[in-house]
Amino acid sequence: MRATRSAGFALLLGAILGAGEARAEHLIVSVSNHRVTVTPNYSGEELVLFGSIERDDHTPLPRTGYDLVVTVSGPPVDMVTRRKERWFGIWVNANSRQFLQVPTYLAVFANRPLDKIAAPDLLRRQRLGLNNVLLTQRVGSDYADVVPSDPFRRAFIRLRSEQGLYRENTSAVTFLTPTLFRTGIPLPAEVPTGTFTIDIKLLADGALIAKTDTAFEIVKVGFEQFVATAAKQHGLAYGVATALMALMAGWMASIVFRRD
């Protein structure tokens, strides 16, 4: 009897382990350029993320195919969104909300609409989509991320989207084969410098089955880099030099356009 129970337990354990190995995908990804240089004539560019889904011999393809969600996030900073109201014919700042350490650049790409990929609860837990990404705000004395319908949150995303710095495109990921994929990452001229992270999540039948990440960097070079470094490391000297240059430019303009 004891031997029968042991054999049954071994079979059950083997079945559990076998089920765990039934989904054994992992992602291999790369980006076309890991270091983007910004020069004075920089007008933006597009990187390409490409990759493959590696499976072992015992892993079947999912019934409905794979789904992929790519989230690109730029350097975090504090920002403020202000609400204007018209008082006596003049537009004034009536209220404001501070956003703490939010991405300066945020892009979400997928192969189809997010509500077709997974249930709302999973999208919220995995922070997939602009409505689900964490945007911490200072609300009075508290720090929290509010509901997607919050007017300040909506206005913040709308303003960043108008600048091309926040975007969501649910048809940007293309599967070249059932396991090979690519997507473009547009970088506008206003893109900030710093390190950008790329978070890639693989889903199948509404469940998360694999994830990975990579990164790239945007840096200034040439005279722009010299000016940025001087402003950051030698603030006082930079300010004095800027003021002197402005005075010199004004003096030269007065000579050039002086009327005899």
Image: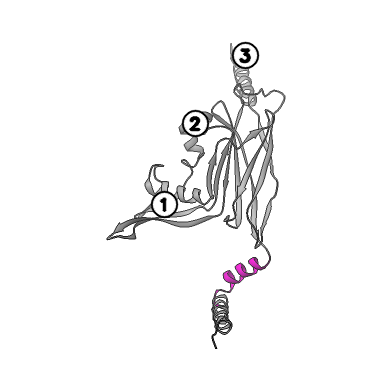
Q: Of tags 2 and 1, which is closer to the observer?
A: 2
**Residue name at image x 52 percent, y 52 percent:** 163
Left or right of residue 202: residue 30:
right
At label 2, which amino acid type do we have? Asp
At label 3, which amino acid type do we have? Ala
> Which of marks 1 and 3 precedes in the sequence?
3
> Which of marks 1 and 2 precedes in the sequence?
2
At label 1, which amino acid type do we have? Gln
Disc 2 from disc 1: Cα separation: 26 Å
Q: Of tags 3 and 1, which is closer to the observer?
A: 1
Given residues 226 and 13, the one toward you in this image is 226
Instruction: Assign the N terminus to one quadrant of the image.
Output: top right
Residue where numbered disc 3 is placed: 3
Q: Is the magenta stretch mostly helix, strand or loop?
A: helix
Q: Can you say whether 122 is above or below 154 in the image? A: above
Residue where numbered disc 1 is placed: 137
Residue where numbered disc 2 is placed: 115
Q: Which color scheme does this rendered protein use?
A: one colour
**Residue name at image x 44 percent, y 50 percent:** 156
Q: Where is residue 50 in the image (x, y as percent from the top left)?
A: 68, 39
Q: Of tags 3 and 2, which is closer to the observer?
A: 2
Q: Position of residue 98 (x, y in %)?
A: 41, 56
Left or right of residue 180: residue 83:
left
Label 1: element kind: strand
Q: Give the range drawn in magenta.
A: 222-236
Q: Residues within 10 Å of mark 3 (few under 14, many from 20)?
A: few
